[in-house]
């Protein structure tokens, strides 16, 4: 069955970043990497035990990917800091962005991001789903603690600093969540937020993203958000949001990744495979499915069956191939990993 599925969906496989079941490469994970030939994986607490285990997992994943398709995988994690930090001690503790905004300077944020990036790179992770560039208006915004400030200029400055630090440390940063969740009061993990700011230009929310694009951020993540001033669709599945605003008006030429397509904001009304197809047609390059692997197989098959999507598929695969070529092919030495984290424990 896996061979048949792989044959049907393999051309679209590189468009997917998927979650894995556990901390080891099991049969399901191997089929995603070898069979479907996904473009990336994202790691969660269920996949992470200690630095050595993470290093072993990432090296095994990369060996499978290189054997299957010749390009290294994008291996991502949410290592923002504060309430969203998947890798715990002995990895560096990262304060919440709100705390950094109160107590640190952009230079200090850049240095911290550089340290975080070097630790991630040591264990074979090459992408961090950070920084958060949302500009929360009030404390009841779900992004309050995860954002540097309610001042868009400060968010922009700290975001630029983090992006530079991650790149200096050898990690691909991801600016999120476009076009900004700062004017919302409900959590998109549960329900679809509605933008409250009536400004059709979204001046406050887009400033940090404009600056991030100018700073060379290679990846931008979409928000599951409806902006009535733009259209009636969720931004992740909106051509207006992704092609008109992000690509044309902000001039972003890198990779657009969706937020998890299994979140309540999407999944309550659209099945994940169909959501993936809609997001891809709207302009997304990398489709994030964090839990149900079968959805990635189904979505890849759906995408491939529609020959009209061929030119879009070629463009997105080209962007992803260029991004994956930036990923180091040579792993860090295990002894170096052990020595670094032994020192961190002291």
Image: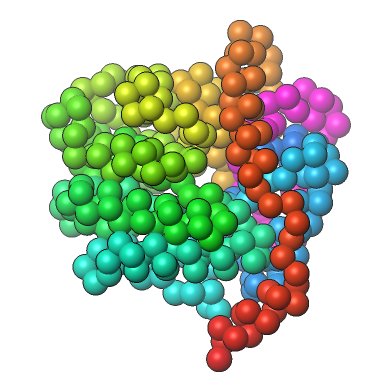
How would you classify the magenta stretch by its main secondary structure? helix
Instruction: For residue 274, say whether it is visible.
Output: no
Front residue of 309/234: it is 309
Q: Is 341 positioned to the left or the right of 142 in the image? A: right
| Magenta region, residue range | 1-30
Q: Position of residue 111 (x, y in %)?
A: 41, 67
Magenta segment: does it hold 183?
Answer: no
The C terminus lies in which quarter of the figure?
A: bottom right
Q: In this view, does 122 lie to the left or right of 239?
A: right
What is the count of numbered marks? 0
Q: Is residue 55 above or below residue 184?
A: below
Q: Height in image: 312 above or below 323?
A: above
Q: Position of residue 152 (x, y in %)?
A: 20, 47
Say which residue appears at 44% left-offset and 74% top-offset: 93
**Which residue is the extreme one toward the bottom?**
346
Residue 170: x and y in percent read 57, 56
Q: Report which quarter residue 306 is drawn in.
A: top right
Q: Residue at x 75, y 77 (%)?
A: 335
Residue at the (63%, 51%) spot, across then down: 75
99 left or right, relative to 124: left
Colour convention? rainbow
Image quadrant containing the N terminus: top right
Q: Which residue is drawn at 71% across and 58% down?
A: 58
Residue 231 appears in view:
yes
Most foreground residue, 160 or 76: 160
Q: Nearer the viewer, residue 124 or 168?
A: 168
Assess whether residue 13 is covered by the magenta stretch. Answer: yes
> Is the residue 81 above or below the residue 292 in the image?
below
Query: Residue 147, image x and y in percent?
Result: 29, 55
């Amino acid at each position: 069955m896996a061979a048949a599925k792989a044959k049907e969906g393999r051309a679209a496989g590189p468009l997917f970043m998927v979650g894995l079941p556990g901390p080891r490469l099991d049969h399901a994970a191997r089929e995603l990497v070898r069979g479907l030939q996904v473009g990336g994986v994202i790691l969660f607490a269920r996949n992470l035990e200690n630095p050595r285990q993470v290093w072993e997992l990432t090296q095994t994943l990369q060996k499978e990917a290189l054997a299957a398709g010749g390009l290294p995988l994008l291996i991502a994690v949410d290592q923002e800091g504060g309430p969203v930090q998947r890798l715990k001690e002995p990895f560096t503790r990262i304060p919440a962005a709100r705390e950094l905004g109160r107590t640190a300077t952009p230079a200090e944020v850049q240095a911290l991001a550089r340290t975080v990036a070097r630790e991630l790179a040591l264990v074979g992770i090459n992408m961090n789903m950070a920084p958060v560039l949302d500009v929360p208006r009030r404390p009841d915004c779900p992004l309050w603690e995860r954002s540097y400030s309610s001042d868009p200029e400060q968010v922009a400055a700290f975001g630029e600093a983090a992006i530079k630090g991650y790149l200096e440390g050898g990690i691909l940063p991801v600016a999120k969540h476009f076009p900004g969740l700062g004017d919302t009061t409900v959590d998109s993990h549960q329900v679809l937020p509605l933008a409250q700011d009536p400004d059709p230009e979204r001046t406050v929310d887009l400033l940090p993203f404009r600056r991030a694009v100018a700073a060379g951020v290679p990846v931008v993540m979409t928000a599951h958000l409806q902006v009535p001033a733009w259209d009636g669709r969720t931004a992740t599945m909106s051509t207006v949001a992704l092609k008109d605003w992000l690509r044309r008006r902000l001039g972003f030429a890198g990779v657009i990744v969706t937020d998890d397509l299994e979140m309540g904001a999407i999944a309550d009304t659209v099945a994940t495979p169909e959501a993936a197809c809609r997001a891809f047609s709207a302009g997304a390059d990398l489709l994030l499915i964090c839990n149900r692997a079968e959805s990635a197989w189904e979505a890849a098959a759906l995408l491939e069956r529609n020959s009209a999507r061929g030119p879009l598929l070629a463009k997105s695969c080209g962007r992803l191939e260029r991004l994956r070529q930036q990923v180091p092919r040579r792993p860090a030495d295990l002894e170096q990993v052990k020595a670094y984290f032994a020192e961190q424990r002291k």
